[in-house]
Each structure stands twice: as structure tokens, then as C-alpha cells.
Image (tube, rainbow, N blue to C red):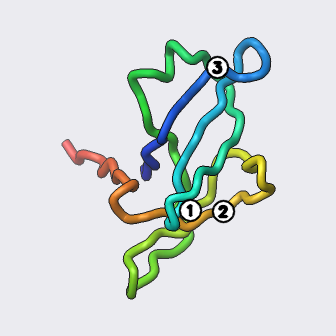
Amino acid sequence: MVFLSCASIRAGLMDGEVTVEVKNYRGESEYFRAAGSESSQKEAQFIEVGVIHQDPKTSAYLVELPMETDSGARRIWVPASAIVVNEPSFA
């Protein structure tokens, strides 16, 4: 599983919803809404994303977000430092 670090998670427009802020490769903010409560999301400042591609020159990742952003993007480029890979353990 691959996770993207969030810049912030705030209360959403409706109950049971949060507004998530992530930073793209250029450091610009992208916002989208997600299900959940702000209190349950404060500890986990990461969201699960799908990795589409990694640029070999910049090491940036093209990721697919769980929801469309306010700007209309579903995929964004993010810095490699914002990605966390949770490798499964084989016991």
C-alpha cells in the first residue's frame, strides 16, 4: 500500500466529511473532500493513493487520488518525500 502525506485535514462542509489538503510537486495546494471525521483523521495525516508512474529524472510520483480535487484533477505529481510505502510483512 502507498500513502501520501497530507498538509492538513479539516472539518468538511457536511457532517461525516473532511477536507484534505495535499501539496503537489510544485508545492501548490490541492483540496478534496473525503468521508470521515476530523477527530479520527488528525492522528493519521496520510491518505492511501495509487501510484501511476515515477519520473526517473525528478523522482516525483504521479499518483491517483481517492477523489477529484477542487481543481478537477484526479491525478497529481507529488514529491517523493511525500510518499510512504507500507510494505507487507510475510510471516
Total numbered labels placed on residues in the image: 3
Q: Which residue is mark 3?
A: 11
Mark 1, secondary structure of its residue: strand
Q: Which residue is mark 1?
A: 63
Residue shown at the point (68%, 32%) measured from the top left? 34
Question: What amino acid does circle 3 point to?
Answer: Ala
Q: Is residue 67 left or right of residue 44?
A: right
User: Are circles 3 and 1 on residues that touch, CB within 8 Å?
Assistant: no
Looking at numbered disc 2 in the image, what kind of residue is underneath it? Arg
Instruction: Tell me the element at label 3.
Output: strand
Q: Quadrant of residue 81?
A: bottom left
Please name the residue shown 51% across and 34% down the image.
Answer: 8
Amino acid identity at mark 1:
Val
Q: Earlier in the sequence, mark 2 or mark 1?
A: 1
* Depth check, front residue: 73 or 7: 7
Instruction: Pick out the residue farthest to the left.
Output: 91
